[in-house]
């Protein structure tokens, strides 16, 4: 059979992906084989494919395809995450464009719009992954809002509440005023920003005296309920027991004392705003201070903001500073660098806010998950992330799991009265009514008396169950699938969600199954541009992955992404990597096309050179197989690719095919052809995880195959013995061939012109490959001699010296002139270097490295002169 004249990536990729889907190769069912399972890090349902997804899913596909070839029952579960904040924001924006305000809708009406959005956009990213070649078990596609997964979330909430681990508390939380919801501590990104420190004078009640406080947030003075001084600060002893007047608001507030105040920071006087600062809230509780919340949910000021009511906090900051300056309260302003918390999702500046929220106690839950990683029951790759993981887990805080959103899993708490504790937690409204009747003793309660908490659960509260819930392991903890596929084998994800998702999955695994959810966690790096900037839409530095696939083919992109992507280290993406990947695919195609185009003649005996070539490559392949096993075992996926790349490009294409190919226009012997085909098939097997499309295309073109014989479900090559001596001998033979080629190139000796080669063989270490050397060097004779051959060009390999007679091959007079000119130039160069080194001033003042470089130039020139003189002597004899 023969391949097309040119490789058409698009048509080949469409053809074989459809074939794989048609034959259901990606689907897995419980059977007698050992399972190999990966669950996808579920991308946001609103998402589209970006470079990070490309890297992450390419690695997963490499692992899953290799597992299939290794005989495992490979199962890769795909799916998407409902992404509460991101999805709700998109739906709200869409409604706004249509002139609809979310607040004018009921929850049910809003959710209809959210589901409509989800059904329209939800499958986009998964369809895009198919273009990459992702061999997910699409029949198992899950969504975190599917019925079973939703029921699992509610069941876990109720269980943790009944265990006393979930509680409702009035706490200072991180408030995202753009999304209008609370966030967990882990969803807040702290960034250093240049701001100002404002010094404000507060009048002391009943006097003309003032005290000065320093604040970065002058807009919050409306919420001040005390001024605090350190009782040990002699500067302010006269203020003890007195009261101050808040500027603009003209409220009288007490001056309290507490050692919490840092006497060295600012003025040593601290304004206390309990509603808008965690530390101030602690102080306020300790001293029974009033709490005045001056902000609306969108961070505009409420009625406590007086004339600034309805204005945004940052606008108020500018305006209030001007007013404070006008009324003589602003003493001075200094620039100040401070850390500002921003929302991971919306990038809005976080506002500390007091609120009734739901929390999960984490300390005891976290311990088994910490031990699992420290004891290497769960392996983090690379291990450098263990310390980060340990720090997080040892300092874990209670998890704020409630969000003020409608899109998501509604918290299963039902209020039956006006009090904060008048609620029950249950999996259904019916169960809640029974519990409420029991708790109140009021048998007259009805469904109408129950009001479900409007808040939704944090998105991560569903995805932390993912490895279990996709196999229905929460609702049916002893079903055959969870017992077979769980724990999963490998998780491939990004380091930035090591705590958000990975740690929490480990926690949930030990809490609900008493075992780890996966064995290995491969942490990819971040895809960056050549300037080391993270690729993002906002920076405009991220190429469209689908455009790249159209241009370079999915196989080319897969190779390009993995060429320089070691675990845990960032990938400096360069489109040239994709060009290199595409060139590799074309190399495989052209080499295979060459082989399949050979004419075969079974009447021809196998040449000795071909027999040696096959024997060498077989051992080389087996040695490479061992290297691949080691790289895969250590999750060095880029190393595994590079090993495979070199095997195919260098050993197979550049050497083996050159050694066995027949003379132009001549047929190849049948034995060699069949052995080369077997080698090609083994190559395709180790190539398949990286370049699934081109490998399947060639595999199917070699001979007619049934669906049961497709490459995707073939068997990984079996390890055999490695002949290290044969490999070592070939390395010497390859150097000899390179030496011959170099002389041919330098002396313009055409390859079609046969030449003699003589060798003084001090080490009898390449004789096995004499026939190969003769063929690749086009030698008329290969002679073993005892002494140097005079009048010949020479080169060395190890301790052997090789000679090519020059008679008839080159113009001796021209060569002597050329060498004489080169000798003259090199001697002149040597004199200039020696002159510099004899200059004491230069030697005494130049850096050591410069001196060392000059000495190296001297020794190189001396060696070159000796070689030229030897060649001239040989030519003149």
Image: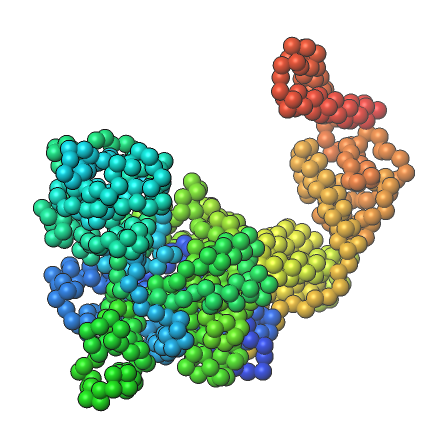
At horizontal 32% and vertical 81% (from top left) the residue drawn is: 427
Residue 834 located left or right of residue 799:
left
Q: Quadrant of residue 632?
A: bottom right
Tell me the quarter of the image containing the N terminus: bottom right
Q: Nearer the viewer, residue 116 or 729?
A: 116
As drawn, 248 above or below 655: above
Q: Residue furthest bottom?
A: 443
Tell me the quarter of the image containing the C terminus: top right
Query: Residue 829 appears at what percent x and percent y?
Result: 67, 17
Query: Residue 687 appears at what percent x and percent y?
Result: 57, 61
Q: Nearer the viewer, residue 119 or 254?
A: 254
As drawn, 663 above or below 327: below
Query: Residue 761 appears at what percent x and percent y?
Result: 86, 42
Q: Residue furthest right?
A: 786
At horizontal 53% and vertical 73% (from top left) the residue drawn is: 515
As drawn, 745 above or below 87: above
Please indicate, yes or no, whether residue 343 appears anywhere in the rendered image.
no
At horizontal 59% and vertical 77% (from top left) the residue drawn is: 34
Q: Quadrant of residue 429?
A: bottom left
Q: Quadrant of residue 48?
A: bottom left
Q: Nearer the viewer, residue 128 or 392?
A: 392
């Amino acid at each position: 059979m023969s391949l097309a004249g040119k490789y058409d990536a698009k048509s080949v990729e469409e053809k074989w992906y459809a074939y794989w889907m048609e034959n259901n190769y990606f689907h897995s069912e419980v059977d007698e084989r050992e399972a190999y399972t990966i669950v996808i890090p579920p991308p946001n349902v609103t998402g589209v494919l970006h470079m990070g997804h490309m890297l992450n899913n390419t690695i997963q596909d490499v692992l899953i395809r290799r597992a299939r070839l290794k005989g495992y029952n490979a199962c890769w579960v795909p799916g998407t995450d409902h992404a509460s904040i991101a999805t709700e924001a998109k739906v709200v924006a869409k409604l706004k464009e249509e002139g609809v305000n979310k607040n004018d809708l009921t929850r049910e009406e809003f959710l209809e719009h959210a589901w409509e959005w989800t059904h329209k956009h939800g499958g986009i990213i998964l369809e895009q992954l198919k273009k990459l070649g992702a061999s997910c078990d699409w029949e198992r596609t899950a969504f975190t809002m599917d019925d079973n997964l939703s029921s699992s979330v509610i069941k876990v909430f109720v269980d943790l509440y009944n265990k006393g681990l979930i509680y409702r508390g009035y706490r200072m939380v991180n408030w995202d005023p753009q999304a209008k919801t609370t966030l967990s501590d882990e969803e807040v990104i702290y960034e250093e920003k240049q701001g100002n420190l404002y010094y404000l004078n507060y009048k002391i009640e009943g006097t003309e005296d003032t005290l000065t406080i320093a604040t970065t947030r002058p807009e919050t003075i409306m919420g001040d309920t005390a001024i605090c001084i350190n009782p040990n600060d002699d500067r302010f002893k006269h203020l003890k027991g007195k009261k101050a007047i808040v500027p603009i608001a003209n409220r009288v507030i007490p001056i309290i004392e507490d050692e919490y105040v840092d006497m060295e920071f600012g003025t040593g006087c601290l304004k206390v705003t309990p509603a808008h600062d965690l530390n101030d809230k602690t102080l306020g509780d300790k001293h029974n201070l009033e709490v005045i919340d001056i902000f609306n949910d969108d961070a505009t000021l409420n009625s406590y903001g007086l004339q600034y009511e309805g204005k945004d906090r940052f606008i108020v900051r500018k305006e209030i500073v001007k007013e404070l300056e006008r009324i003589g309260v602003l003493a001075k302003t200094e620039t100040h660098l401070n850390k500002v918390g921003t929302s991971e999702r919306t990038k809005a500046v976080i506002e500390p806010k007091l609120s009734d929220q739901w929390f999960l106690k984490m300390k005891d839950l976290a311990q088994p998950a910490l031990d699992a990683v420290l004891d290497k029951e769960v392996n983090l790759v690379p291990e450098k992330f263990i310390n980060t993981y340990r720090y997080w887990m040892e300092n874990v805080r209670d998890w704020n799991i409630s969000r003020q959103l409608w899109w998501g899993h509604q918290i299963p708490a039902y209020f039956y009265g006006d009090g904060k504790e008048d609620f029950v937690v249950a999996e259904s409204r019916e169960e809640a009514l029974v519990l409420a009747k029991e708790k109140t003793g009021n048998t007259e309660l009805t469904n109408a008396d129950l009001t479900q908490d409007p808040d939704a659960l944090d998105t991560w509260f569903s995805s932390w169950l993912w490895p279990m819930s996709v196999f229905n392991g929460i609702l049916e903890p002893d079903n055959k699938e969870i017992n077979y596929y769980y724990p999963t084998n490998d998780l491939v994800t990004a380091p930035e969600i090591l705590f958000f998702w990975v740690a929490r999955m480990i926690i949930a695994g030990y809490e609900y199954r008493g075992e780890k959810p996966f064995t290995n966690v491969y942490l990819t790096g971040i895809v960056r541009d050549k300037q080391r900037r993270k690729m993002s839409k906002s920076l405009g530095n991220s190429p469209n992955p689908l455009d790249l696939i159209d241009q370079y083919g999915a196989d080319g992109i897969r190779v390009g992404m993995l060429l320089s992507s070691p675990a845990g280290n960032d990938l400096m993406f360069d489109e040239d990597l994709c060009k290199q990947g595409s060139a590799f695919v074309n190399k495989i195609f052209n080499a295979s096309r060459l082989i399949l185009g050979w004419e075969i003649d079974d009447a021809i005996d196998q040449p000795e050179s071909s027999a040696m070539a096959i024997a060498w490559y077989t051992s080389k392949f087996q040695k490479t197989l061992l290297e691949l096993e080691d790289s895969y075992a250590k999750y060095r996926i880029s190393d595994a690719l590079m090993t495979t790349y070199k095997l195919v490009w260098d050993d197979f294409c550049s050497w083996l095919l050159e050694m066995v190919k027949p003379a132009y226009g001549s047929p190849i012997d049948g034995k060699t052809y069949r052995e080369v085909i077997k080698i090609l098939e083994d190559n395709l097997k180790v190539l398949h995880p990286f370049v699934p499309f081109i490998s399947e295309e060639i595999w199917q073109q070699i001979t007619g195959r049934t669906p049961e014989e497709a490459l995707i479900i073939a068997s990984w090559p079996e390890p055999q013995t490695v002949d290290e001596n044969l490999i070592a001998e070939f390395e010497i033979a390859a150097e000899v061939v390179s030496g011959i080629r170099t002389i041919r190139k330098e002396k313009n000796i055409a390859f079609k012109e046969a030449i003699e080669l003589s060798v003084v063989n001090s080490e009898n270490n390449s004789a096995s490959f004499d026939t190969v050397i003769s063929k690749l060097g086009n030698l008329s004779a290969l002679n073993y001699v005892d002494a140097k051959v005079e009048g010949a060009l020479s080169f060395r390999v190890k301790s052997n010296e090789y000679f090519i007679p020059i008679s008839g091959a080159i113009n001796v007079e021209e060569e002597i002139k050329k060498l004489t000119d080169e000798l003259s130039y090199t001697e002149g160069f040597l004199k200039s270097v020696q002159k510099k080194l004899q200059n004491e001033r230069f030697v005494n003042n130049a850096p050591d490295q410069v001196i060392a470089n000059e000495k190296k130039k001297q020794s190189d020139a001396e060696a070159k002169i000796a070689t030229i003189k030897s060649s001239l002597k040989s030519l003149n004899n």
